[in-house]
Amino acid sequence: MHGRAGSVYLLLMRGVHVGGVILSVGLIAGLLTVVGQGAHAASAVAGKPCKVAGQEATDAQGRTLVCKKNRKGRLVWTVKKGGGPSPTPPQAPYMWWGTWADGWKQVAPAPPCPKDLSTLFTRLPFDLDDVTGIVRPGHQGDSGYKPHSHIRYSESDADGRQVIYAPADGWLYTAARYREAFTPGNDQVILSFFTECGVMWGFDHLRDGQLSPAMAAAVANVPVRDMDTQGTNVTPVWVKAGDVLATAVGATNCEVGRPLCIPSGGPNYFVDFGVYDPRQLNEAALSDPSFLTGPNVGAYEGIAVCWIDLFPASKAAIEAKALGESDYC
C-alpha cells in the first residue's frame, strides 16, 4: 500500500486479479492521517483541468483554488490563501478486520442507510443499449469467485468508448492502475467508492487515459503496476450520481496469452461493476455456513449484493441481457 501523506481515512487495499477480471479485494488495515491543505486539490474540481497559471476554480467543499506550478514544474490546483476553511475529511465508516470471524466493523459514525438501497442508486452506470451481455454478480468463474458483475460490449464497438457513470452519490477512496494488456494505451483502472452511510461500489477495467478530468486528477499519483491491482488510498473525491467517471473500457488490443486477452488478440471491451454492503452479511452467507469457505475467501463475497435489484426501473431490461447463475440474485 502506498498511502499518501495527507490521506484521509482508513483503507489499505490489497488487490487480487486473476483472469483479467477483478478483483481488488479489500484488506483494510489502519487509519491514515488527515489531508494537508492544498494537497492534490485538483481532484476535487470536476471537469476543470489546471492549464493556466493564476486560473481560479471552486472545489466541491467551496474552497477557492488557484492554478500554480509545483516543484516539478507541473500546473496543479492549490488552495488559495484565505480561500476558505479546510473541510473535515471523510472517514470510511467500515473496516475489514482480515477474517470472516472478525468481519467488517463500523469504525466511524455514519448516518443510517435507507431501508430501500435503490433510493441511493439513481443512475444506471452504463448505457444498456450498447451492452451485449451482463454476467450476474456472485458466481464461480474460471479464475475464482466473482462477487461483481462482468458487463460486455460488442467487439465491433467503436474503440470501447463507453461512458461509465457514478451510480450513486459517494466518495472515491481508493484506486489502482495496472498494466495487464501489454499494449500502449490499454492500462486498466480500478475505482472504489463509498456512500456516506457506508455502502460501497466500484469498477474495474476502466481504461487509463480515458477517465474524466476529476478522476484523472485523483489518480494521477497512483503508480501503474505490472499485473498488480493493489489499491492506493487517494484524497477522497465527492461524486454525484450521473457524474461521468470514464469514457472507455477494456482493451483495444492485447498480447495473446495474457489473462485479459481473447484468442484473436483483441479488442476486448468490458467493465466490472459491484456493490457491497458491509453492515451485515448477505443472504448467501447467512443461509449457508460453508459459503465463506473454500473459494469464497475474499473480503467482498459475504457483503456483495444483487445490484440488479437496485435499479428497478431498468431491471427487466438488465435481466434480458443477464447471463449465468448468481448466489445473490
Image: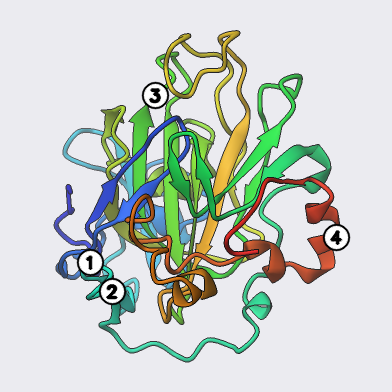
Look at discs 4 and 1 and give the one toward the viewer. Answer: 1
Q: Amino acid at mark 2?
A: Gly
Look at discs 4 and 3 and give the one toward the viewer. Answer: 4
Mark 2 or mark 4, earlier in chain: 2
Q: Which of the image's four quarters has the C terminus?
A: bottom right
Q: Residues within 10 Å of mark 3 (few under 14, many from 20)?
A: many
Which disc, if any, is residue 30? none
| Residue 51 seen in the current view | no
The colour style of the image is: rainbow
Which residue carries the number 4 mark? 316
Helix, strand or loop under label 3:
loop
Mark 2 or mark 3, earlier in chain: 2
| Residue 116 seen in the current view | yes
Which disc, if any, is residue 180? 3
Q: CA distance from mark 4 to mark 1?
A: 37 Å
Helix, strand or loop under label 4:
helix
Mark 3 or mark 1, earlier in chain: 1
Residue 154 x %, y %: 74, 27
Which disc, if any, is residue 103? 2
Helix, strand or loop under label 2:
loop
Residue 192 x %, y %: 43, 56
Q: Amino acid at mark 4?
A: Ala
Q: Amino acid at mark 1?
A: Thr
Q: Residues within 10 Å of mark 4 (few under 14, many from 20)?
A: few
Is 306 on the left-hand or right-hand side of 48?
A: right
Residue 172 x %, y %: 42, 60
Q: Residues within 10 Å of mark 1 (few under 14, many from 20)?
A: few
* Residue at the spot 44% in from the left edge and 13% down from the top edge: 183
Which residue carries the number 1 mark? 99
Q: So how many labels did they put on this image? A: 4
Which residue is at the front of the view, 36 or 310? 310
